[in-house]
Amino acid sequence: MTASASPADTVDEFICRVVALDLDGACELVSDDLEYDNVPVGKNHGPEGLKTFLGMMVSGFAEVQFVVHRQTVTGNIVMNERTDRFRLGEQWLDLPVAGVFEVNADGKISLWRDYFDMATFTNEMTRLTTSA
Amino acid sequence: MTASASPADTVDEFICRVVALDLDGACELVSDDLEYDNVPVGKNHGPEGLKTFLGMMVSGFAEVQFVVHRQTVTGNIVMNERTDRFRLGEQWLDLPVAGVFEVNADGKISLWRDYFDMATFTNEMTRLTTSA
């Protein structure tokens, strides 16, 4: 990423690294005071908090995709509507998500907040793990 | 609303009418083919679908507020991050929400999709109705 990257560019590149499971690379794009909030679950902070929680989230999945349906940008705030997909064996868990990102003056992501329905995730996990 | 209202203006006015519980006024700002999607619950369609579902949602509450924390706009798409608040007696139910709106060429809202955690809503309802 260059200093001239737009907030949307930064978020796009961040998502590329997350779904590639390059968590160290993803951490390079966040600020030391990152707030990473999964609304029904709770908050984690900083690059280490991100790496720990995301690492736990994706562990055991063979592949991860974030399909971005819509993305809007005003100033340093980026919001997107996504289907986050997690593959277990031959099956996919699909989670509808709306995300909020703030990019600070240094071009680092200082806020990532995801809104989703927890029961949708747990029901999908049950479906996959009982039919696998 | 005038023909020159921006998509953000239209969404702002729509929310004003919703929280004022002016559902007929809110319906004037949506298209006949409106998709109104509460992600964990399901979809409703058209002004009548909106009025029926919203009417059910707000019935029994003395007051409704949508507190908009962030709003982003790209083209005809508006996204916002909100706390939707519903008052029962002297207590408030607070629901964190991310919303997606599309405004069509006629200046009418053709999509309203809200992302939230259903268990947060039901747990808050339980808290209010058992302590009221």
Image: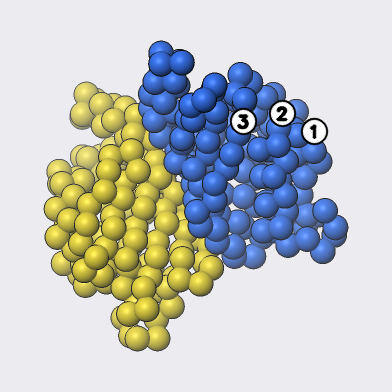
Chain colours: A yellow, B blue
Residue B121's disc number: none
Residue at (21, 29) in percent of width and height = A129
Residue B64 vertical position relative to residue A61 in the rendered view, above or below = above
Residue B83 can be seen, yes or no: yes
Q: Chain of mark 3?
A: B
**C-alpha separation, residue under disc 1 versus residue under disc 3:** 17 Å
* Residues beneath discs 1 and 2 located on the same chain: yes
**C-alpha separation, residue under disc 1 versus residue under disc 2:** 8 Å
Ranked by sequence position, the earlier of labels 1 and 3 is 1
Task: Classify residue B64 as left or right of residue A98.
Answer: right
Are the residues at dot 1 and dot 2 in contact (C-beta closer than 8 Å)? Answer: yes
In this view, the residue farthest toward the bottom is A3
Residue A16 can be seen, yes or no: no
**C-alpha separation, residue under disc 3 versus residue under disc 2:** 17 Å
Ranked by sequence position, the earlier of labels 1 and 2 is 1
Q: Chain of mark 1?
A: B
Task: Classify residue B61 as left or right of residue A114.
Answer: right
- Mark 1 highlights which residue? B24
For badge 1, the amino acid type reads: Asp
Residue B26 vertical position relative to residue A25 in the rendered view, above or below = above
Q: Nearer the viewer, residue B88 or B46?
A: B88
Residue B100 vertical position relative to residue B53 in the rendered view, above or below = below
Ranked by sequence position, the earlier of labels 3 and 2 is 2
What is the count of numbered marks?
A: 3
- Mark 3 highlights which residue? B63
Give SS at disc 1. Answer: helix
- Mark 2 highlights which residue? B51
